[in-house]
Amino acid sequence: MIISPTFLTIHFMIKLSWHTISPEETLKTLKVDKSLGLTEEEAEKRRSVYGLNVIREEKRKSPFLLFLSQFNDILVWILIIAALLSGIVLKELIDAIAISSILFLNALLGFFQELKAERALEALKKLAAPKAKVLREGKEILLDSSLLVPGDILLLEAGDVIAADARLIESFSLSIDESLLTGESEPVGKNPLALKKEIVPLGDMKPLVFAGTVVVRGNGKAVVVATGKDTQMGGIASLIQEEKEKTPLQIEIKKLGAKLGGICIGIASLVFPLGFLRKFQPVEMFLTSVSLAVAAIPEGLPAAITVSLALGVQRMAKRNAIVRRLHAVETLGSTTFICTDKTGTLTLNEMTVRKIFLKDLLKEPEELKEFLTDPQYHFLILTSLLCNEVREREGKLVGDPTEIALVKLAEKQGYKKEKVLKKYPLVNLFPFDSERKMMTTVHKSNDEFFTLSKGALESISAHCRKVPKTAFKTAEDLAMKGYRVLALAYKKTNQPPASQEDAENDLFFLGLLALSDPPRPEVPQALKKCQEAGIKVSMITGDHRLTAESIATEIGLLNGGLVLSGEDLQKIPEDEFEKLVEKIRVYARVDPKDKLRIVKALKGKGHITAMTGDGINDAPAIKLADIGIAMGETGTDVTKEAAEMVLADDNFATIVAAVEEGRLIFNNIKKFVHFLISCNISEVGTIFLSILLGLPLPLYPIQILWINLITDGAPALALGVDPPDPGLMERPPRKRDEGVLTPEGLGKIVKQGLVLTFFALLSFFISFKMGFSPEEGRTILFSTLVLSQLIHAYLFRIGKSDLREAFKNKYLNFSFFISLSLQLIITYTFISPFFHAYPLPLNAWLLPFLASVGAFLVNFTFFPYKEKGS
């Protein structure tokens, strides 16, 4: 049979509405017999149209081009030019090698990080089922899943990973774990009945099964309706492959590079003609202009940023936050809005019996001690333990999460399944099905038979002699609070039941069990800290609205905020949603596209967003968010590869610790950027004003480069690991457009640089008045700039607080000692001529010392460094 264009048109027109048509219509549309399946010839024809059932990967850069792309940055280009000028024009090979090494190491680091980032798609591919049981030409065969086509009949049973999106045509007690796709903690019961609504949340599409999900219980037959990129998982794959936005820090450094580029050109174009007018040697002025241009660029900036981020990453790892992309570290510190998954993030991802209704009393499991001798308590626990299909495999309980919760309840009450089964061996089992909504097991003990049943209250009550009215009201109240409620019943007979009807007749009502996935105990406190830090939090989950709202209320997240379902979200126009998005605290029954819409709306409002999650459905939004956070224990490889950060302990409280580290890192980057630029302004200002005032040329090119090397190096790196300031987590997050250099900050930097310039020139001028030679005067000025910049670094350690705080950064103290030692070495050893340094008498050091301390005190008094909000 040739597939006609009409068939293809019909297929694509209704591919999003397979759940609204009957199994018979589906089979007719796809032209396939449910008892025979496709022929091999027909399957091959369809494969030529739809392609293989695999996730397609967009064409990516080669490793070589990926490495070269790391150099595509204005600041990097300027530094490359600086390295070439230092090596070729100025013959300063050491400086050229130092700059080149920094650039190469930064590029290498970025290259490996981007290479890691592309593993998300590979991880997604691994989730696809390698084999599928298919009906072909009336025979059941095991087929490579990549060969599936629309129209293939899948045969499903417990344990199968579904290989393609398919429409159910038959099912028996079929439950599927869709948590990786929807985030819903409980398995979803499936049946082939068509739905009336066309727009339905993914988790409510009962007639459909999806690629990558797992059959937990029952069996069924389904016809494939979508393969490869057309599946839900394929859609997620295409979203993951979208290019990641740059972090705020990367954007800021790029802007800074552009500004510095303009400054370099401006300096070179001003100083050279000015020196020429003052009749300095043209060659000397050219070298000085080039040196000043190089001096204006803080060569230590990329290294300081890299080291600061890397050390921050190490600290975060000790606090269970594993950072996968270095430049994303600071983003978390400026986050204003966290969009968090519920299951496994705010909750334990473990269904638990939390309330028990027994003898007209609602109790916590821990409060059951008063019933220990009561037969009704005994049989309620016995039913929990035995009326299920849970089995133990390799020391772990395997089966439906709800049934596992019942077994765990019994075990906590001192009942062990193996031991109890010896006393009450299984005689018969009537499994759960969607029509009866109950399950029954029959056990024998001595000469008596015990029938144990569990299920929905309306089903169990129909088979019981009497059920207290309070049970119905209690069940309703518990359901309204988001609990899943099960009713339990039993009876004792002298003869084995003759049939299922006989077994489930005339039961004695035991009580109710209320289950939910409980919140992590540390979450309420973590949320409180987020609020104190000015960070808003929204829960985004695939779970039902009542369940989500209940958890949000319990952990203190709701606080009068709005609750929206995925269905509500689809009805809200974009402009109205943008007005509401900051007020919404809970999103329930949402799909991956909804999560993307939420993140986009928040970013549109100027928020720096963080998205946490564990399932593959979270991966696209995690990649779109400014900072993506995956769960380390329950998270899929897909989510981890798409994320910038992984929480090793799946602990929401770890996010708060990571926020603190992120803020500290950005503050430290801001400190050394301000330090470096203010120091470089002092160098430029000193030479420019000396020439303008008619003073001798104050510094040689090699001296300018030396000052840059020892002040842009160790002190800047030491500021990059400065300990946190008090109240760091009590300040509001910085705004997206508030960069490292604000207009206010730049004004203060210029003033600080001019103060350093004034005292340096003052020492230069006084040296001549005191009778020092031009060589000694130049060395005094040279030493003054070095010493004043080293002392100036302490201004950023203390701001305008207690001077005793100045020496608490041991790395800064060490860098001061090393840098000053190096300055003394080039002044008093055999290499001093190389640096044009003249060995000074001891009394000459009084000028650099007094000038440096004077500059520090003026800046400390009038232009202190101060964090916003501190």
Image (spheres, rainbow, N blue to C red):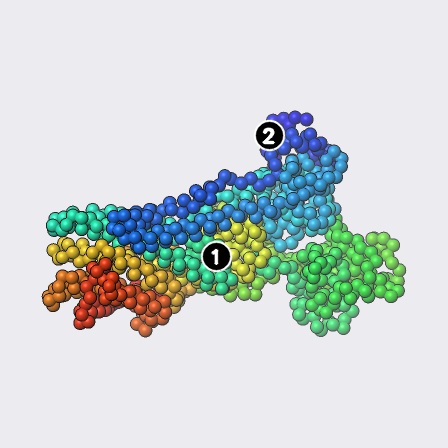
List the residue tagged with mark 1. Answer: 323
Closer-to-camera residue (348/248): 248
Residue lying at the far front of the rendered structure: 830
- Residue 67: x, y in percent? 43, 46
Quarter occupied by the N terminus: top right
Q: Is residue 852 left or right of residue 50?
A: left
Q: Position of residue 224 (x, y in %)?
A: 66, 38
Looking at the picture, how far across and down is residue 83, in whole percent?
31, 50
Q: Which residue is drawn at the image coordinates 58% and 52% (left, top)?
A: 636
The numbered mark at residue 93 is: none
Local packing at callout 1 (Cα closer than 10 Å; few below 14, some 14-19, many 20+) is many
Can residue 310 be seen here? The reply is: yes
Crowding near the residue tagged with mark 2, few <14, some 14–19, many ≥20 C-alpha atoms within 10 Å: few
Question: Going 67% across and 32% down the picture, which residue do you hit?
Answer: 43
Distance, label 2 to label 1, CA atoms, is: 46 Å
- The answer to which of marks 2 and 1 sits earlier in the sequence is 2
Quarter of the image that includes the C terminus: bottom left
Residue behind mark 2: 9
What residue do we see at 51% from left, 65% from top? 525
Disc number lying in front (2 or 1): 1
Q: Quick one: SS at disc 1?
A: strand
In the displayed structure, would residue 214 be above or below residue 745?
A: above
Amino acid type at mark 1: Val
Q: Between residues 136 and 222, which one lies in front from this camera angle?
A: 136
Q: Is residue 854 left or right of residue 241?
A: left
Indicate the amino acid at tag 2. Answer: Thr
Q: Tell me which residue sits at (24%, 65%) in the image.
A: 829
